[in-house]
């Protein structure tokens, strides 16, 4: 499928000895490198000679079909073998008590945009306000001591509206935790603060100014594009998040080409959740032509992975990979089940330490709940952790575990 078919004219030549695993066309930089190798090595590149060349050089033949490295994907679980071992070695019904790999933390529930599909709006209504800076520092110390690797500063609201944002980021860096930021990109960030961030993801969600005004009720599209370029200058990994709806896909290819020029690392497309009236089942495979390994990646996996309801009928063994702390101090076992008003936090960092909450009875009981297959099948909404649960289920079913 091509969004702009008039841009791409293809001459197809049928050949009875075709190779289904070969791809010789000019869609991206990897294709250009392959074609350059062919023309450098073959004086007269006819179909027969090209196929013969690729047959003799299988590494070259598949050079333009290598998958991109994904900053957001299943592979990241293998970076934490101790955590994986801790999850797999727990018997049914018993939760993994090791600290989460990373924690998603909201500094504020205030926001300066009004996204039509926002899944956090009701949560912000239930728990308005900002997180106390001293309470924040205390929980950062606790997470560091417990073995957590990173903190994601996100919404809730827009983190850059937090009055002591710079102080918060500097403290995470001083303690020695990695820090990521999810922002709407409407505010500038001091370059010294940018250097303390391991990554930034900007929630753009619009391909042009008109779309942005329509779905976010703001005219700050160009301001965000300018800020993205600024972030790239001082932060090592800057990506763009893009929630795909039925109102924001008019100019995806021009947007991608513009974003590539800024130097960002990736753009991640995800389906809209909790608002089916905005859903769009657009097939985005055609955008993969803009991959430039390893400089720039198009990530569309979530368009399928994040659409599974009921946790694929599996137990949620991966719930301990992360935890959510809201701006009112609430600690949640799950960042998706908290859409339900009856799914209460397992504690509050204004009243207990994170350690007390994580090892506490409320957390144990709620963990047993999400380790119940029937509960997950009935109540789990679309969730990014489902893919990890599918993997863990497959590993658990292996019978010959002492062999490769």
Image (cartoon, rainbow, N blue to C red):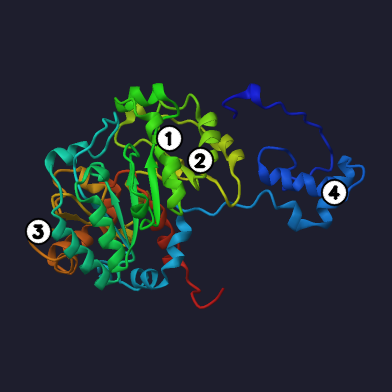
The location of residue 92, given as percent across then percent down, is 29, 68
Q: Measured along the vertical axis of the image, is residue 316 above or below residue 38?
A: below
| Residue occupied by mark 1 | 225
Residues under numbered marks 2 and 4 in contact, where contact means CB atoms less than 8 Å apart: no
Q: Foreground residue, 396 or 347?
A: 347
> Could you tell me which secondary element the residue under label 1 belongs to?
helix
The location of residue 36, given as percent across then percent down, is 78, 46
Answer with mark 1 or mark 3, whichever residue precedes in sequence. 1
Mark 4 burial class by Cα count in 10 Å: few <14, some 14-19, many 20+: few
Mark 1 burial class by Cα count in 10 Å: few <14, some 14-19, many 20+: some
Answer with mark 2 or mark 3, whichever residue precedes in sequence. 2
Q: CA distance from mark 4 to mark 3?
A: 67 Å
Q: CA distance from mark 2 to mark 3?
A: 41 Å
Q: Foreground residue, 221 or 114?
A: 221
Q: CA distance from mark 2 to mark 1?
A: 9 Å
Q: Nearer the viewer, mark 1 or mark 4?
A: 1
| Residue occupied by mark 4 | 40
In the picture, the disc for residue 394 is: none
Position of the N terminus, as image quadrant, is top right
| Residue that sits furthest to the bottom in the current view | 402
| Residue occupied by mark 2 | 262
The location of residue 71, given as percent across then percent down, is 47, 53
Residues under numbered marks 4 and 3 in contact, where contact means CB atoms less than 8 Å apart: no
Q: Quadrant of residue 355?
A: bottom left
In the picture, the disc for residue 350 is: 3
Q: CA distance from mark 2 to mark 4?
A: 32 Å
Q: Nearer the viewer, mark 2 or mark 4?
A: 2
Q: CA distance from mark 1 to mark 3?
A: 37 Å
Answer with mark 2 or mark 4, whichever residue precedes in sequence. 4
The location of residue 169, given as percent across then percent down, is 28, 56
Residues under numbered marks 2 and 1 in contact, where contact means CB atoms less than 8 Å apart: yes
| Residue that sits furthest to the left in the current view | 351
């Amino acid at each position: 499928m091509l969004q702009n078919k008039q841009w791409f004219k293809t001459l197809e030549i049928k050949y009875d000895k075709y190779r289904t695993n070969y791809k010789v066309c000019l869609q991206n930089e990897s294709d250009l490198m392959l074609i350059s190798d062919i023309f450098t090595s073959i004086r007269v590149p006819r179909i027969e000679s090209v196929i013969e060349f690729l047959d003799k050089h299988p590494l070259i033949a598949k050079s333009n079909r290598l998958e991109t490295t994904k900053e957001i994907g299943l592979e990241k679980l293998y970076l934490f073998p101790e955590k994986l071992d801790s999850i797999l070695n727990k018997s049914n019904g018993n939760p993994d008590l090791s600290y989460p790999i990373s924690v998603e933390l909201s500094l504020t529930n205030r926001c300066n945009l009004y996204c039509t599909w926002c899944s956090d709006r009701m949560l912000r209504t239930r728990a308005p306000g900002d997180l106390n800076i001293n309470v924040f520092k205390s929980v950062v110390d606790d997470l560091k001591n417990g073995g957590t690797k990173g903190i994601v500063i996100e919404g809730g609201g827009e983190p850059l509206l937090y009055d002591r944002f710079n102080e918060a980021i500097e403290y995470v860096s001083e303690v020695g935790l990695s820090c990521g930021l999810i922002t709407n990109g409407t505010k500038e960030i001091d370059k010294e603060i940018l250097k303390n961030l391991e990554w930034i993801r900007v929630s753009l969600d619009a391909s042009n100014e008109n779309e942005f005004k329509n779905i976010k009720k703001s005219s700050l599209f160009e301001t965000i594009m300018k800020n993205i370029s600024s972030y790239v200058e001082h932060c090592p990994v800057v990506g763009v998040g893009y929630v795909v709806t039925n109102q924001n896909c008019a100019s995806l290819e021009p947007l991608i080409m513009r974003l590539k020029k800024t130097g960002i690392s990736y753009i991640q497309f995800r389906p809209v959740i909790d608002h089916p009236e905005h859903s769009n089942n657009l097939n985005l495979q055609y955008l993969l032509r803009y991959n430039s390994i390893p400089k720039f990646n198009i990530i569309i996996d979530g368009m399928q992975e994040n659409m599974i309801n009921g946790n694929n009928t599996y137990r949620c063994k991966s719930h301990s990979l992360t935890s959510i702390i809201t701006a009112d101090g609430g600690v949640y076992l799950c960042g998706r089940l908290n859409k339900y008003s009856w799914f209460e936090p397992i504690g509050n960092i204004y009243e207990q330490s994170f350690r007390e909450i994580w090892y506490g009875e409320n957390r144990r009981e709620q963990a047993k709940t999400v380790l119940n297959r029937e509960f997950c099948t009935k109540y789990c909404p679309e969730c990014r952790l489902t893919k990890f649960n599918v993997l863990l289920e497959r590993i658990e079913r292996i019978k010959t575990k002492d062999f490769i």
